[in-house]
Image (spheres, rainbow, N blue to C red):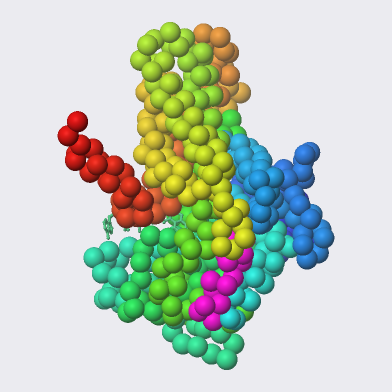
Amino acid sequence: MGARTGERFLRELAAQRRDVWIGGEQVSANVTEHPAFRGIARSLGGLYDLQHEAPPVMYASPSSGEQVGFSFLQPRTPADLELRRAGMLRWARSSCGMLGRSPDYLNSSVMALAAASPFFATADPRFARNIEAYYEHCRERDLCLTHTLITPQSNRAAGPSAQADPYVAARIVKETDNGVIIRGARMLATLGPVSDEIMVFPSTVLKATAEDAPYSFAIALPSDTPGLRYICRETFDLGRSVFDHPFGARFEEMDAVVVFDDVEVPWERVFLMGHPEHCNRVMNETGAVAHMTYQVVCKNVAKAEFFVGLSTLICDAIGIDGFQHVQEKVAEIILALESMKAFLRAAEADAAVDQWGLLRPAWNPLNAARNLFPRLYPRLAEIVQQLGASGLMALPAAADFAGPRRADLDRYLQGRAASAEDRVRLFRLAWDAAVSSFGSRQVLYERFFFGDPVRMAGALFQSYDRAALAARVQEFLARED
Ligand SMILES: Cc1cc2nc3c(=O)[nH]c(=O)nc-3n(C[C@H](O)[C@H](O)[C@H](O)COP(=O)(O)OP(=O)(O)OC[C@H]3O[C@@H](n4cnc5c(N)ncnc54)[C@H](O)[C@@H]3O)c2cc1C
């Protein structure tokens, strides 16, 4: 089948009926026509089309020989990494970095997990075969995946096995001839309602104990599996035009609680089960987290580029570029951009072939980037608020420009070098980036999507090789010259 086009993605998504709830109602029609999901479904379709645009970001599948998507490529050479980066940047730039869960994020995970199949074999040889087959399944169909890692936020003072209700967090209930039965919930799956399949995996930072064995597993399921349910938050796509809601109308990824109502997972979709120790190590040891972070840093570059461009246009539009504090603020955004570009470059320059034979981008710069961007991003949104000021509220809609008061708008909302309509179009974009529900979610997303920043910093503290640096300081202390 090979790399998808947008048309094929939409057709295949429409053919699959999944159990999605929003606003107290079940989505009975196909999701691609539902007002909450129509925009994002089309935007995802647009990404698939972009793979085919010249120069195409695809490669020949080792099994079928067909052209398949860049993000499935298992990188073994610098040229492979370059193709991956080119595809990732192309996708991320097309959404100004606002689509965190473009399919390359999880494709990167699956491709790395499969390369590390011997890791799974140390738990059970079947698991190794399963992860390899799953990678091929996703690659050949160019699937769009979601994932869910975190248990529900009932009582964070206790682990999943010590909750008052042992079935709050999704857990294994029993094994059958065909597979395992899972009951309970996971906290969140971004893109869930429009994904083809869901990966239910261990977190990269939350460590399981021996008692958590029934909650420790790695599986994947089609989104239309019986008993699997997505319960969505309210949508930020209000069905408005792209003039009114430039991001909300296009890139509303949706976040959903995932319920497993005695879901049967076939054995061939079980990659780890009842091995808390393996679950604790899987994302780091396989390299999956490094390849996912590489995608994240590409997205960060595109997002920071967008903020440099946006702030520049705001300055031009209302003539604030000459003020020193404005220049300082735009410079702060440039620092964020150049930092992300430097991290990306360093990760590539220091990439090394890992124990699974893949060229893995260097972890230290990636880890630094994933710890830093959650701190930088809220500031980028804040700077847009500081520069835009009341312009982020004086925002008539497309209907106002089409209505009888247009002359008022043309006169009173004109910019220094922009018509009123162009200035409002720009400021509506700034509002959707930094003020609207969509923009606020982006801030929350960047703060948390990769894990609790506090515990990510703890992981950095614990894993970073500081011994040589401490020894150097000791040496200096011992000097008497
Ligand atoms: C927009 C958005 C989209 C997301 N999409 C996905 C997705 O698609 N798939 C997915 O799996 N996850 C997703 N997540 C979830 C994300 O992984 C979590 O937000 C993150 O891991 C933090 O977990 P939590 O939200 O449960 O916060 P909690 O762990 O409940 O933390 C809440 C607060 O308590 C503190 N805290 C809790 N426990 C401890 C502790 N042991 N030590 C110190 N401090 C503690 C935290 O620092 C934080 O301040 C998404 C999150 C957001 C916001």
Residue 171 placement: quadrant: bottom left
Residue shown at 37%/32% (left/top)? Answer: 379
Q: Nearer the viewer, residue 123 or 134?
A: 123
Q: Is residue 278 above or below residue 66?
A: below
Residue 415 percent across, percent down from the top left: 51, 11
Residue 13 placement: quadrant: bottom right
Residue 200 percent across, percent down from the top left: 50, 68
Left or right of residue 107: residue 332: left
Q: Nearer the viewer, residue 150 or 191?
A: 150
Left or right of residue 63: residue 315: left
**Residue 338 part of the magenta segment:** no
Tell me the quadrant of the picture where the C terminus can be found.
top left
Q: Nearer the viewer, residue 19 or 335?
A: 335
Residue shown at 35%/15% (left/top)? Answer: 325
Residue shown at 67%/50% (left/top)? Answer: 77
Residue 424 percent across, percent down from the top left: 53, 21
Say whether residue 38 is visible. Answer: no
Residue furthest to the left in view is: 480
Q: Give the main secondary structure, helix, strand or loop, of the magenta stretch.
A: helix
Tell me the quadrant of the picture where the N terminus can be found.
bottom right
Q: Is residue 137 above or below residue 473?
A: below
Residue furthest to the right in view is: 65
Residue 461 percent across, percent down from the top left: 31, 51
Left or right of residue 46: residue 243: left
Q: Which range is magenta?
A: 107-124
Image-quarter location of ligand 1 = bottom left
**Residue 115 part of the magenta segment:** yes
Residue shown at 57%/91% (left/top)? Answer: 177
Say whether residue 349 is visible. Answer: yes
